[in-house]
Amino acid sequence: IRSRQSARAILCTKFVPDNPRKQFCVRNLFPTIRASNFAYKMGIAQWWNAAFLFAACAIAFCQPAKATEWGNRLYFSEKNFLFNALNDVENPVRISYNTVQTLTHVTLQNRFTSGSLHAIDAPQRANDLSASIFGLQRVGRFNLSGEMKYTLTNAREQRWNNTLMLSEDNPFVLADSVSGNPAQELFNLDATACYKFSEQWRAALRLSYETASKDDQTDPRPKTTAMRFRVQPGITFQLSHQHLLGLNGNLWVYSSDISHTVVDNLNANTYFLMKGMGDNAIVSTGENPSYPRHYQGLQWGAAALWKARFDHYQNVLEAGFSHNDERAEDGGSGPAFKGGDYASTAFRITNRLAFPGYRYLHQNLLLGFSWQTDQGWWYDQRRRVDTEHGNLVYYEILNKGKVHTATVTKASVGYRIDRYLCCVPSWMLSLKADWEHRAQTHYEADVYRQSYNRYAVEVEGARYFIQKSVSYNVMARAAYSNVIGTPQYASVRGKLDQAYTARVFAFSTLPTVRFLLRTEAVFPLKLYHSPTCLTAFLQGDVSFCTDKSRFSSAFNSTSRTAIDVGLSLTL
């Protein structure tokens, strides 16, 4: 939609059932005319039936509905965000409040990433190819949602982490310092079913299954498999016309196995059993070439929400907590060696204050706060041989001690304004600011501490416009982040100071600037007498280090670039 001084040119797409061609019409409308006088729905021909099967016994049907507006297909994600205040909450019942409740969205995407401005365990270069299918469907009292995604990644020059899907703050990482070129596969299934019992009660269940595998052909040739399974039940109760209450639970199960294969036995490599802040125990490939490790984890939590709706605004407040336990055990079928126990507890609060529809402007104020505490325990162990029982080898636990504690506090504030007229967005502007405080302590022969305060500011804008029968969407983002004050740094092992510990800390405290530009061209199609959108998109994402780090020179004058190109089909 284009706005001019005295008139608005509005493009409406109308599909006539007995005519195989789409009819596009442009009407010049003056501001005195109400939007309801020209905002009409398009008729469509009979849709073809399709079934969309996801995770376990959940089924999400992707059959297009009748009388679906063109804007619903073209801008379903924007519309569900603006007109569903529960769109971003954790409770799975949120899908039943979507404005757009029926569609199928298929995406094929390729991402190319390169540059030295990356975390120490990230690859120097990577090529990601992904394919996904997402569906929404309403069937009677049921609202269904499902997604299936496959990603193939070919990485180059990656080291210092042989794990998969491990919690980001878990310090007990199994790693090697040899640069390799691993290949990784990721497969995800996600399904949600929501049932409306009455006008007051709604309940939903979400199931998610994610599995991945990674292998490398460079000695010590790690091979890793991992799995995460999530169960998330939720319920909401409409207390009155103005107030809604919700409650949901969360349960995650995590499992991962790592093994190694050494082909060249003449050169010995080292496995690093990391404990945090550079502290580690080492094992040589000469002692144990395969060195297997098994991770298992269990995370549980809950969240509650309150939605208040008034004449000119609505507010959604959500509070939640979670507790996570992950344990590492080495040895496989052989003697068990404990590789560290990790536990974390987190609390979070989010609030969304929405002012919808005043002069076609939708405004949202977004607030967030989270606090997390981590703890890690290490076992001092000694290898023993039981000569009385057939020379059975085992590890005797001499001591269990806390070696790692950390607290992470985050706060964010954001403001977003959208102009949305006649079922089509015109433009969007978003401002956001984040703050993070991280402090960790490591206990070895002495007490070591690291801490820093970091902030980030971001501005994002989007413009939507139509030329002839093609819709064009342009989105741009700029962000800057830096530390506040002077970070506190310490390293436990001097041998790995510059090779590992200093680089990890320097990357977390670097001043960086980031620019992102995304363009989309949306072409109307007709498949099986149905209005359909084919989208071609191109995205560029560039980050720069703007100053030198006093902790490591590895990031001086570095940058990182990511380019995304792909196609998506929405029907």
Image (spheres, rainbow, N blue to C red):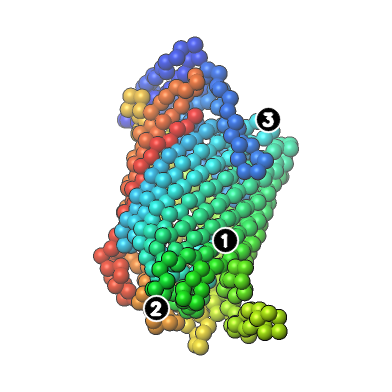
Q: Which is more foreground, mark 1 or mark 2?
A: 1
Residue to which mark 2 is pinned: 496
Upstream in the sequence, badge 1 or badge 2?
A: 1
Which residue lies at the image location 35% right of the left edge and 34% below the top edge? 521
Of circles 1 and 3, the one toward us is 1
Instruction: Choose the circle earlier in sequence order: 1 or 3.
Output: 3
**Separation of disc 2 and disc 3 at Cα?**
61 Å
- Side of 270 relative to 352 (left or right): left
Q: What residue appears at the point 65 percent right and 81 percent down from the top-left corner? A: 391
Query: Quick one: SS at disc 2?
Result: helix
Q: Nearer the viewer, mark 2 or mark 3?
A: 2
The three-letter code of the residue at mark 2 reads Leu
Q: Amino acid at mark 3?
A: Gly
In this view of the protein, which residue sits in the foreground, 147 or 460? 147
Rounded to the nearest whole Å, what is the CA distance between mark 1 and mark 2? Answer: 26 Å
Q: Residues within 10 Å of mark 2 (few under 14, many from 20)?
A: some
